[in-house]
Amino acid sequence: MELTKILKGVRVKGRVKKIVIQKICYNSKECVMGSLFVAVKGTECDGHDFALNAYQRGARAFIAQRKLNLPDDAHEIIVSDSRRALSAAAANFYGNPSLEMKVYGVVGTNGKTTTTYILEAILREAAMNPGVIGTVNYRYADKVIRANNTTPESLDMQRMMRMMRSEDVKSVITEVSSHALHQGRVNGIYFDAGIFTNLTQDHLDYHKSMRNYFLAKRRFFNLSLMRSRMEKSVWAAINIDDKHGARLFDEFKESYKVIPFGMRRCEGVYLKDAAVTVDGAALTVHTPKGEMKIDTHLTGEFNIYNILGAIALCVGEGIPAGIIESGIRNLKQIPGRMQKINTASGCIFVDYAHTPDALERVIMSVRRLGVKRIITVFGCGGNRDRGKRRMMGDISARLSDISIVTSDNPRDEDPGEIIDEILQAFKEAGNEKNAKRCLRHVDREDAIKEAVRLMQAGDAVIVAGKGHEDYQIIRGERLPFDDMRVVKKYLKKYRIKEVR
């Protein structure tokens, strides 16, 4: 494609030459002859420092935020923000595939992944051949690709959406992270609709404050959906039980169609009745199109919110009630999201809960199932928001019968020091008595082993923090580790039978 066409809509300083581009890259190692290299400044390294390597591999056109001082035959194009320029260039290069499909974004702190699975089940039932881009993996047309980021870089996303369309994918559901919104990775995507799940503390190592975190999420509604209105008729489903969601609803309800959802009565989708058990839930849901009877294998109050959000979006899409009900009913379990094992000695849940709000919701949801004791295994990630550590320790101290504090992904930090920060919460006023019910195991496998050993009839074990992840990051190494496999290993060791 000609470079001038690739850069349509991109503000550049100077003239753009009419040269043919074979490939766009932001990783210099992927460049070949005829490539356009986009120098993106990341959090750990700066693409501008690899421009010469890109040139040596064949790139002759470059987008950058400063002069690169390459040989004379290199065409350097200066922009104010190369990452946002990449978003526009990628969309142009791949022919704007988001205009050829329905595209739904899921925004929020907790519940994004589960919501995408629920939507996928409904859209599959509706013969909309969905593709999914999310935390667990990227999947479409029976293909599964390992996920490196919740929301990929714009170039990768546009390439993937073009591949999806070539496989007759008719709808795409994507988790939209706050990082992606702040960095403009989804600027080149035209969305049909979006869901806001909730906003609670997370990623403050990046955003620095809850206000900045909220403003990053807000970009989906005041930028992504607003921009999409130029090409599509857009709408949003917003959880108004969340104070940030209520704020978004009030702000944007006059800009485009917004369907509110929540537990209490509202003008949109709300829960009328619920019977929740360890094996699932039976829900009666009010919608603007009439009542729905929802039978689901998912359990927990927070999953009810995820179901309500998915219903609200599908009602906005005009999907019939019978298809919505059938899609939800057919969804069994979600990897690492309240993933349950029933045993003769009790129940075990593996969940991704790695924020204070998520951990509290998981423990409280399990408590409402009428179990005898709750044994919670959890930790906190290294090189991330340290403010969560005492908060999560306090939650487990108050709500669990036994807490086993262990490693999550310690990354470059000392795992013992992270655990000690969490344990401070057990020593503070009000939690002293719970300190006797707290165990410390730096090795995560030892922690899970101890939880399984301690489990008695009627108990529930919650293994929180990593969910679907099949690795641990320790001192820069990505080591194999899967919570579910470790749980099953020790069920077998202690001869505890699974109950179907």
Image: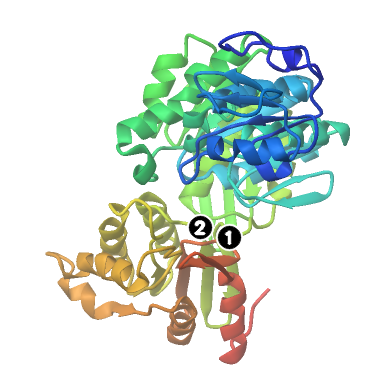
Quadrant location of the N terminus in the rendered image: top right
Q: Nearer the viewer, residue 364 or 229?
A: 229
- Name the residue that disc number 1 marks: 336
Report the amino acid beneath label 2.
Tyr
Total number of numbered discs in the rendering: 2
| Alpha carbon distance from label 1 to label 2 | 6 Å
Quarter of the image where one finds residue 372: bottom left
Q: Position of residue 494 (x, y in %)?
A: 56, 91
Q: Is residue 429 left or right of residue 308?
A: left
Quadrant location of the C terminus in the rendered image: bottom right
Q: Position of residue 279 (x, y in %)?
A: 59, 62
Q: Residue furthest right?
A: 167
Which sits earlier in the primary sequence, circle 1 or circle 2?
1
* Residue 119: assigned label: none
Q: Is residue 7 above or below residue 189?
A: above
Helix, strand or loop under label 1: loop
The residue positioned 50% from the left and 44% from the top of the image is 45
Q: Is residue 311 left or right of residue 404?
A: right
- Name the residue that disc number 2 marks: 352
